[in-house]
């Protein structure tokens, strides 16, 4: 449970950004600065440990702050609704490509070091990272559809863009418990 809480906290700057970034440029500037600060404060230990999600988050909000405040880049501002989930998708998929599924880093904080190198443990973390990466791609497509004004009520876009994150948290916890139960059952059968 602790690992899931830490994973959720890892997404906290992104959640805060969704809440703080309002329709005005000033609110966007404040949101970028606040979320960069938040990601540095809550992610300080994770940054030292090289957590990919935390580093990606800090880089995104630092770059975003530069683009919005420093450069007043309207292209960036206009496309933020698509860039946010696309960045999260990129973080997830890049973490897989470099062999460090971002979920693995959080899972290690909640498990016995003796299983960190076990193929089953790594496979579960890879699976969950693929699920998260897929959910972020889905959110990117929803944001793109909304940006392109492909139709549909606003509430539907809200549900389709926040639903995947809620599903991801619930699925992660369910899948983790399922795999732990399977492991206990296998251990009992082998004893």
Image: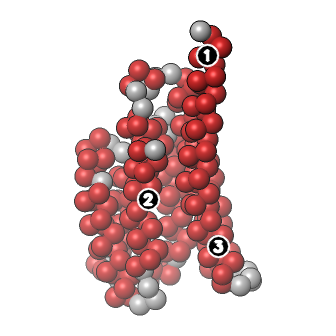
Is the residue under label 3 in contact with that under label 1 (CB below 8 Å)? Answer: no
Q: Please rate how many residues cluster around mark 2, counting C-alpha atoms within 10 Å: few if below 14, some from 14 to 19, many from 20.
A: some
Where residue 176 sits in the image (x, y, percent)?
57, 39
Does residue 74 appear left or right of residue 97 in this picture? Answer: left
Give above or below for 184 relative to 46: above
Q: Which residue is mark 1?
A: 188
How far separated are the C-alphas under marks 1 and 3? 42 Å
For this rendering, which residue is in front, 3 or 147? 3
Give above or below for 146 relative to 107: below
Residue at the spot x=63%, y=36% of the render? 178
| Residue 127 can be seen in this image | no
Q: Please rate how many residues cluster around mark 3, counting C-alpha atoms within 10 Å: few if below 14, some from 14 to 19, many from 20.
A: few
SS class, disc 2: loop
Q: Which residue is mark 2?
A: 11
Where residue 88 sits in the image (x, y, percent)?
50, 58
Sooner in the amino-acid sequence: mark 1 or mark 3: 3
Residue at the spot x=46%, y=23% of the render? 115
Which of the colour schemes (rainbow, by chain, secondary structure, one colour) is used? Answer: secondary structure
Where residue 138 sits in the image (x, y, percent)?
65, 61
Q: Residue furthest right?
A: 151
Is the residue under label 2 in contact with that under label 3 (CB below 8 Å)? Answer: no
Sooner in the amino-acid sequence: mark 2 or mark 1: 2
Where residue 57 sits in the image (x, y, percent)?
38, 59
Residue at the spot x=66%, y=70% of the render? 160
SS class, disc 1: helix
Sooner in the amino-acid sequence: mark 3 or mark 2: 2
Q: Which residue is mark 3?
A: 159
Which part of the image, by quadrant, shows the C terminus?
A: top right
């Amino acid at each position: 449970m602790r690992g899931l809480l830490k994973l959720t906290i890892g997404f906290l700057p992104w959640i805060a950004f969704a809440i703080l970034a309002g329709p005005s440029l000033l609110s966007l500037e404040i949101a970028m600065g606040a979320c960069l600060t938040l990601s540095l404060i809550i992610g300080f230990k994770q940054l030292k440990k090289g957590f990919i999600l935390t580093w990606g988050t800090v880089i995104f909000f630092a770059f975003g702050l530069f683009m919005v405040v420093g450069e007043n880049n309207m292209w960036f501002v206009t496309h933020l609704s698509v860039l946010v989930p696309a960045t999260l998708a990129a973080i997830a998929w890049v973490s897989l490509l470099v062999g460090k599924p971002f979920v693995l880093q959080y899972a290690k904080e909640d498990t016995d070091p003796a299983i960190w190198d076990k193929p089953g443990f790594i496979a579960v973390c890879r699976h969950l990272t693929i699920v998260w990466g897929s959910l972020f791609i889905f959110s990117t497509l929803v944001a793109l559809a909304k940006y392109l004004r492909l139709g549909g009520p606003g509430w539907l876009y809200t549900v389709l863009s926040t639903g995947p994150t809620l599903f991801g948290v619930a699925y992660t916890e369910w899948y983790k418990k399922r795999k732990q139960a399977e492991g206990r059952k296998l251990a009992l059968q082998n004893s």
